[in-house]
Image: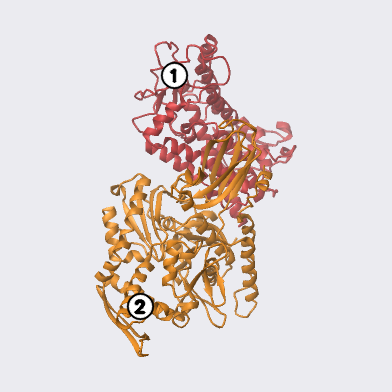
Chain colours: A red, B orange
């Protein structure tokens, strides 16, 4: 591809625009750009997409197709840019932003179109001005934050202290403190003192109380041991009592980590995962163990939740499939177990987990989040689901924080 | 939005600070170049109110109308031990208000310490407005960590009267740690102690600092111990000597006492560095023959140390208890930070070294660091800075009265804020109609020795044998130390709830009246700008007023 790369700046001034771009383009891994004089196919394209929050996302791709006049549902002439994998964090950002915007969205909003233009590489890449003023003001931003905090409060409430802080069952004092510190910076009521809404402040305070209580409950070795005991045998959704698995052993057994990469890029279609905090592994067989992806700590938090002589089911195969990114295969394995023993919660949680991971890989964060929540309902000790959720929340709040400080910063 | 200032309202001196454009807190000086303002308010015979250095200057001729140490009285009852001690040595008269609060007699009327403190706050606000060239309406005001809710609320009321919206009442040692630690970010967790001995109060806080998070592990202190106690000891000794020599009782002469006090304070400052000093007070009083008493005396550091040994010893116990509460040993403390002018006194430093086993650091200016921290915190609240987060604690136990006069702690002191604690109680009698829950704050097991915060009544309980009716009590203390209480009967789900904001002693009406009077007075020329409408402040009062505790009202809230 000899053609020099093209650089384009796109600005979404409103959520509606962003939604339009997302639905029509990003969701299919491509983006259409208007162009009367399209550069040759294969030309690399870099798009700096500025969101209504002023966050910028860089999309890389190449021109995959020239669209003739009236082509692609009347959108032509132009080019269709095939995008390389969009970083998880970027997609998550867009989707969270959209999800919260949708609450106030009006039908037909996506008819608003973005003025997109592309020029041949010879000329300077001119910034595309797609900015349209819309009514998103500070009050809206506060409402958005309020809704998000309320939802967050609701989902955090269901978690045990380990899940809430996003740490493993074998976490050290330092791990717990660090996690608490992170969350404190985000949720401490002082962070919200600048907002007018008392309701917003009280939600933040409620969330912080959950965090602080979790920290108090698992802040040191002794309390952690107690808290682990307290989790006791897993409680699942109402249903038949778990057959042979009723006597699950709540005592955690530590297993030395084994060098299997938790994150894989073996499957090309899966976008590279953003560096997530250590993926704790819900291990249900006595043998499997997976290292924490990021933490060099020798004591990887591996929790064996189901051991015992009578336990013949070995999930390590499925687990390692998950680790390898073979979600479909893992799902199949879990399904087999579940069919064999319908009361097997681990298998049911595994199925949901595999579905969730699959959704995550396909960039469907909302679906993934729902799946992970189901996993936790079935199996509250499932570390991987807890971690994935924690990581998703982390990304989401970081972005929201940026959003609000910018909006309010402008006003002041 | 106007900028939020940080005010250190001290017993002897006050200081104001703000975040500059670079996000660094800096002290705002007076046009005369002073960086602190004496917390002295004078009511002159001509009806003027003078604050700061001019007030102190005219003190000798107007001792009875020159009020200092209002912070010692704010939110206090006149019969408290330390208040009566203070009353004995103060050259002005301390009287009891209708509700038993300590007020100050000024000529033909009495004024609340809130109102006196508000004059100081207004002065600090004016200093800031002059230095910044813009109006200021919002402030963070610091108080000793060991202040209880009543004292805090009274301080807040003082701010309201001064036309300030007090965004937050911040603990002095915490403020100091924030100012001190913010730019000394070192990797890892460090446990530090902030030892704050000011003019009138003593605070000790044990804090952990890690990655921009300032966590108060424990706090303790003595709200009635400070530099002025040293002064008073010296004054008492000198007055005794005069009595022995001349049979003249100086304590009946406010003028002479004022002069002695000032001289003692100066001598103490000199003796922080030198080992001896001379106090010369010509014509201090008249002897029995009408002749002049010329006071001239050499005083040594050792002598003062002898006079104040017990004061220094009183510093130890709160420190030990705070260490205990924090679950650390002196060896865990990496640094001891000194705050407050009285920490310059060598014997105090020796005591610190004895308790913590290490030399305290003297890097910071103990007179300014609290105000700097208040400004830094104002920056956090205003969203100007994201570098630091403060986790503070509640300094006193909060609980309820059980039995006749026992105190059952529900929220333990040094609990990280915000906090919620739920407890289940059962009825004690058959077909009990109602439960009345009285809330107290303090450390004593005898509830009558603690401060009552309020009361909640849950009535129309369903009938049942003793113990069968269960009431869940839930106490929530928010980040501003505002206590909300709910009581819920489990069977019917019936609820009663109140938000208790301790009353600082002044009612909303009284506060509004003072503000109105102030405004009327200010119609005279030379008064501060009229933008002082106290608007935000008044609105605030409406929410801070303690709700009526009439059970019907309370239950009406559902």
Name the image quarter holding residue B295: bottom left
Q: Residue A91's x, y, as percent?
A: 57, 35
Asked if both marks, 2 and 1, belong to the same chain, the answer given is: no
Disc 2 crowd, CA 10 A, few/some/many (<14, 14-19, 20+): some
Residue under label 2, please give it: B263
Residue A265 in view (yes/no): no
Please tell me whether residue A59 is drawn above or below residue B48 in the rendered image: above
Q: For mark 1, give the secondary structure.
A: loop
Task: Look at 63% across and 61% down and name the residue there.
Answer: B508
Q: Quadrant of the C terminus of chain A?
A: bottom right
Please tell me whether residue B97 is drawn above or below residue A400 in the rendered image: below
Q: Nearer the viewer, mark 2 or mark 1?
A: 2
- Residue B103 numbered tag: none
Task: Give the letter of the chain under mark 2.
Answer: B
Task: Look at 44% across and 35% down and name the residue there.
Answer: A217
Q: Residue B460's x, y, as percent?
A: 66, 38
Q: Is residue A230 left or right of residue A38?
A: left
Front-most of residues A129 and A171: A171
Disc 1 crowd, CA 10 A, few/some/many (<14, 14-19, 20+): many
Residue A270 in view (yes/no): yes
The alpha-carbon separation of the residues under discs 2 and 1 comes to 78 Å
Task: Give the letter of the chain under mark 1.
Answer: A
Q: Residue B153's x, y, as percent?
A: 54, 58
Please tell me whether residue B23 is drawn above or below residue A378 in the rendered image: below
Front-most of residues B179 and B304: B304
Q: For mark 2, give the secondary structure.
A: helix
- Residue A284 numbered tag: 1
Please tell me whether residue B231 is drawn above or below residue A3 in the rendered image: below
Q: Is residue A245 left or right of residue B309?
A: right
Q: Are marks 2 and 1 in contact (CB under 8 Å)?
A: no
């Amino acid at each position: 591809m000899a053609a020099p790369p093209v650089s384009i700046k796109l600005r979404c001034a409103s959520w509606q625009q962003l939604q339009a771009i997302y639905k029509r383009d990003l969701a299919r891994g491509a983006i259409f750009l208007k162009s009367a004089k399209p550069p040759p196919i294969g030309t690399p394209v870099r798009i700096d997409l500025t969101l209504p929050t002023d966050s910028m996302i860089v999309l890389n791709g190449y021109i995959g197709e020239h669209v003739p006049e009236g082509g692609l549902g009347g959108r032509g002439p132009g080019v269709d840019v095939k995008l390389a994998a969009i970083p998880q964090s970027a997609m998550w950002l867009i989707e969270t932003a959209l999800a919260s915007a949708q609450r106030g969205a009006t039908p037909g909003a996506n008819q608003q179109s973005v003025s997109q233009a592309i020029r041949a590489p010879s000329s300077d890449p001119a910034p595309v001005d797609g900015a349209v003023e819309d009514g998103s003001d500070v009050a809206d931003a506060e409402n958005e934050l309020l809704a998000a905090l309320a939802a967050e409060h609701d989902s955090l409430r269901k978690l045990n202290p380990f899940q809430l802080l996003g740490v493993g069952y074998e976490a050290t004092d330092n791990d717990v403190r660090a996690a608490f510190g992170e969350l404190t910076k985000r949720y401490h009521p002082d962070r919200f003192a600048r907002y007018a809404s008392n309701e917003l402040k009280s939600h933040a305070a409620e969330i912080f109380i959950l965090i602080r209580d979790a920290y108090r409950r698992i802040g040191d070795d002794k309390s952690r041991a107690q808290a682990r005991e307290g989790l006791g045998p897993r409680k699942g959704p109402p249903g038949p009592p778990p057959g042979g698995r009723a006597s699950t052993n709540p005592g955690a057994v530590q297993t030395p980590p084994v060098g299997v990469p938790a994150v894989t890029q073996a499957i090309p279609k899966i976008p590279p995962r953003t560096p997530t905090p250590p993926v704790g592994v819900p291990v249900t067989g006595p043998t499997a163990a997976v290292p924490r992806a990021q933490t060099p700590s020798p004591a990887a938090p591996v929790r064996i939740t189901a051991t015992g002589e009578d336990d013949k089911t070995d999930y390590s195969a499925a687990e390692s499939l998950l680790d390898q990114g073979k979600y479909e295969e893992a799902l199949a394995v879990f399904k087999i177990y579940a069919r064999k023993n319908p009361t097997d919660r681990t298998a049911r949680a595994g199925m949901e987990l595999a579905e969730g991971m699959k959704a995550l890989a396909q960039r469907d964060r909302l679906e993934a989040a729902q799946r992970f929540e189901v996993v936790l309902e079935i199996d509250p000790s499932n570390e991987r689901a807890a971690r994935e959720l924690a990581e998703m929340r982390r990304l989401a709040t970081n972005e929201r924080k940026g959003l609000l400080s910018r909006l309010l910063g402008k006003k002041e | 939005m106007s900028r939020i200032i940080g005010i250190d309202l001290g017993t002897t001196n006050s200081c104001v600070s703000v975040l500059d454009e670079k996000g660094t807190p800096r002290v705002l000086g007076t046009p005369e170049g002073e960086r602190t303002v004496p917390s002295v308010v004078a009511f002159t015979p001509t009806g003027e109110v003078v604050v700061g250095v001019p007030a102190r200057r005219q003190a000798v001729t107007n001792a009875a109308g020159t009020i200092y140490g209002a912070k010692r009285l704010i939110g206090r009852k006149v019969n408290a031990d330390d208040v009566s001690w203070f009353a004995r040595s103060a050259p002005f008269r301390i009287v009891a208000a209708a509700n038993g609060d300590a007020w100050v007699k000024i000529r033909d009327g009495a004024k609340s310490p809130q109102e006196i403190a508000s004059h100081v706050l207004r002065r600090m606000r004016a200093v800031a407005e002059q230095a910044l060239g813009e109006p200021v309406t919002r402030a963070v005001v610091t108080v000793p960590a060991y202040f209880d809710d009543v004292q805090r609320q009274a301080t807040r009321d003082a701010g309201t009267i001064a036309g300030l919206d007090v965004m937050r009442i911040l603990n002095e040692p915490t403020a100091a740690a924030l100012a001190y630690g913010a730019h000394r970010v070192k990797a890892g967790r460090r446990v530090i102690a902030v030892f704050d001995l000011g003019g009138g109060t003593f605070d000790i806080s044990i804090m952990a600092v890690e990655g921009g998070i300032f966590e108060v592990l424990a706090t303790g202190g003595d709200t009635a111990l400070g530099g002025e106690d040293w002064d008073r000891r010296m004054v008492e000794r000198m007055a005794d000597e005069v009595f022995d020599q001349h049979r003249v009782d100086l304590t009946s002469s406010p003028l002479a006492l004022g002069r002695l006090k000032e001289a003692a304070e100066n001598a103490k400052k000199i003796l922080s560095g030198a080992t001896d000093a001379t106090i010369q007070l010509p014509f201090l009083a008249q002897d029995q023959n009408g002749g002049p008493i010329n006071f001239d005396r050499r005083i040594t550091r050792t002598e003062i140390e002898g006079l104040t040994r017990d004061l220094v010893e009183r510093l130890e116990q709160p420190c030990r208890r705070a260490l205990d509460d924090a679950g650390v040993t002196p060896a865990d403390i990496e640094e001891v930070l000194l705050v407050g002018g009285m920490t310059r006194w060598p014997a105090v430093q020796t005591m610190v070294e004895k308790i913590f086993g290490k030399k305290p650091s003297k890097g910071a200016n103990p007179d300014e660091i609290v105000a700097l921290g208040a400004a830094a915190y104002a920056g956090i609240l205003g969203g100007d800075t994201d570098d630091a987060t403060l986790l503070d604690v509640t300094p006193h136990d909060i609980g309820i009265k059980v039995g006749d006069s026992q105190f059952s702690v529900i929220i333990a002191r040094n609990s990280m804020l915000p906090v919620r604690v739920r407890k289940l109680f059962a009825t004690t009698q058959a077909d009990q109609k109602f439960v009345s829950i009285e809330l107290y704050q303090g450390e004593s097991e005898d509830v009558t020795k603690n401060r009552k915060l309020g009361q909640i009544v849950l009535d129309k309980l369903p009938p049942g044998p003793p113990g069968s009716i269960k009431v869940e009590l839930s106490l929530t203390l928010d980040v501003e130390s505002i206590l909300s209480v709910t009581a819920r009967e489990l069977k019917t789900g019936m609820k009663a709830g109140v938000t208790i904001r301790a009353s600082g002693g002044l009612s909303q009406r009284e506060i509004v009246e003072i503000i109105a009077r102030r405004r009327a007075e200010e119609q005279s020329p030379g008064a501060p700008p009229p933008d002082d409408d106290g608007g935000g402040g008044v609105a605030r009062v409406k929410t801070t007023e303690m709700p009526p505790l009439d059970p019907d009202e309370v239950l009406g809230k559902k």
